[in-house]
Image (cartoon, rainbow, N blue to C red):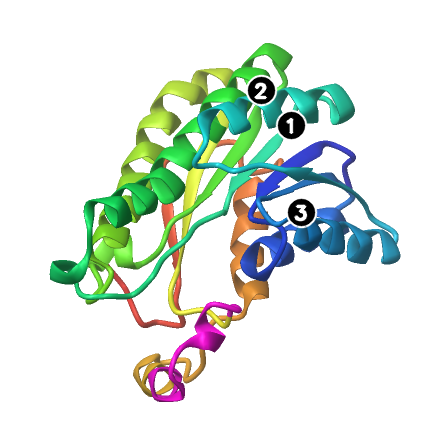
C-alpha cells in the first residue's frame, strides 16, 4: 500500500474512472482530471465512499494553457505525482474521405498532443521531486494495426506509442518508466452508443467472446504503475481478449 499521488486524465467516466478506482484501492491519493467537472466529482465521491482519497480537477487537455494551469493546481493542493496516467481521449468513427481539417486537428490535439502536454508538465515535476515515477499512456490497438473509419485516430494513437518509447529512453535515468496500454474494443459509454450489430460482430471476432471491461484495462495500468516494475519501460501491452496479437 502507498500514499503516493496518482494523476489520471479522463477520470470522469469509463476506463479513466476504473483506473482512478483501481489506483485508489492501492492506497494512492488520486487526482481525477476531466473536462467534465461533474463526472470527475462523481468519481471522487465514489472513491471516498469506499474509503479512498481523491480530488477532482478540471482540465481541457487540448488546451496547453489549461494543462499548465492544472499541473500547478495539482502540485499546490496534492504535491507532485509519482504516477501519471494519460487516459483522456476522443474519437468519432467516420470514413477518412468525409473528414475535415478541423476534425483532424481535434483528434490530434486531444489524443496525441494532450498526452504530450500532460507528460511535459508532470514529468518535470517528477524529475524535480527526484523519487522516480511511472507514466502510463493509454493508446489503442487501432494505433498498432489500424482501424477502418478511424484513420486519423489510429495515427494519433500510433503517435502515442512512439512518444511513449521516446519518453522511456529519456526518463529512465531519472528512475521514471514510460509504458503504454493499448485497449481493444471496450465496453465504455462511447461503445454503448454504437449500433448493437457492431457489438455483436466484435463479440464474435474476439477470441475471449466479449468486449473488454474498463476494469480489464485498469489491471494493466496497475501492473505498469507498480513500484516493483522499475525495469520495465518503453513497452506496449494490448488488452484485447486475443483480438490483436501484433
Q: In the image, which is nearer the foreground, mark 3 or mark 2? A: 3
Of callouts 1 and 2, which one flags the residue occurring earlier in the amino acid sequence? 1
Please give the label number shown on residue 126.
Answer: 2
The answer to whether 140 appears left or right of 8 in the picture is: left
Q: Nearer the viewer, residue 44 or 239?
A: 44
Query: CB under 8 Å between callouts 3 and 1?
Result: no
Q: Which residues are magenta?
A: 188-200
Badge 1 density bin: few <14, some 14–19, many ≥20, Cα 10 Å: many
Whether label 1 touches label 2, CB < 8 Å: yes
**Disc 1 designates what residue?**
81
Q: Is residue 33 above or below residue 120?
A: below
Q: Nearer the viewer, mark 3 or mark 1?
A: 3
Element type where label 2 sits in the image: helix
Give the number of the disc on residue 53: none
The image quarter in which residue 53 lies: top right
- The image position of residue 140, as x and y in percent, is 35, 55
Q: Check the image and report above or below for 195 versus 58.
A: below
Q: Earlier in the sequence, mark 3 or mark 2?
A: 3
**Real-space CA distance between mark 1 and mark 2, rounded to the nearest whole angstrom:** 6 Å
State the residue at coordinates (22%, 47%).
155
Q: Quadrant of the N terminus?
A: top right
Q: Is residue 69 left or right of residue 207?
A: right
Q: CA distance from mark 3 to mark 1?
A: 21 Å
> Dot 2, crowdedness within 10 Å: few (<14), some or many (≥20)?
many
Name the element at disc 3.
helix
Q: Main secondary structure of the magenta part?
A: helix
- Residue 105 visible from this viewpoint: yes
Secondary structure beneath disc 1?
loop
Q: Is residue 182 magenta?
A: no
Residue 12: x and y, percent? Answer: 63, 53
Q: Residue at x 43, y 21 (%)?
A: 171
- Residue labelled with disc 3: 37
Amino acid at each position: 500500500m502507498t500514499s503516493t499521488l496518482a494523476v489520471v486524465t479522463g477520470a470522469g467516466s469509463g476506463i479513466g474512472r476504473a483506473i482512478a478506482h483501481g489506483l485508489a484501492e492501492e492506497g494512492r491519493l488520486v487526482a481525477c482530471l476531466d473536462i467534465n467537472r461533474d463526472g470527475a466529482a462523481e468519481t471522487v465521491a465514489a472513491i471516498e465512499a469506499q474509503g479512498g482519497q481523491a480530488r477532482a480537477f478540471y482540465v481541457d487537455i487540448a488546451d496547453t494553457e489549461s494543462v499548465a494551469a492544472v499541473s500547478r493546481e495539482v502540485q499546490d493542493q496534492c504535491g507532485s505525482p509519482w504516477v501519471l496516467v494519460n487516459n483522456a481521449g476522443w474519437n468519432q468513427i467516420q470514413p477518412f474521405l468525409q473528414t475535415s481539417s478541423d476534425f483532424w486537428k481535434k483528434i490530434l490535439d486531444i489524443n496525441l498532443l494532450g498526452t504530450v502536454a500532460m507528460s511535459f508538465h508532470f514529468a518535470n515535476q517528477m524529475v524535480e521531486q527526484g523519487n522516480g515515477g511511472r507514466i502510463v499512456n493509454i493508446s489503442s490497438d487501432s494505433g498498432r494495426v489500424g482501424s477502418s473509419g478511424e484513420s486519423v485516430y489510429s495515427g494519433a494513437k500510433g503517435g502515442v506509442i512512439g512518444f511513449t518509447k521516446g519518453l522511456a529512453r529519456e526518463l529512465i535515468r531519472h528512475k521514471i518508466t514510460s509504458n503504454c496500454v493499448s485497449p481493444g474494443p471496450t465496453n465504455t459509454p462511447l461503445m454503448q452508443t454504437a449500433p448493437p450489430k457492431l457489438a455483436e460482430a466484435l463479440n464474435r471476432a474476439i477470441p475471449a467472446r466479449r468486449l473488454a471491461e474498463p476494469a480489464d484495462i485498469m489491471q494493466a495500468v496497475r501492473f505498469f504503475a507498480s513500484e516493483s516494475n522499475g525495469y520495465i519501460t518503453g513497452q506496449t501491452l494490448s488488452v484485447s481478449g486475443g483480438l490483436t496479437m501484433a
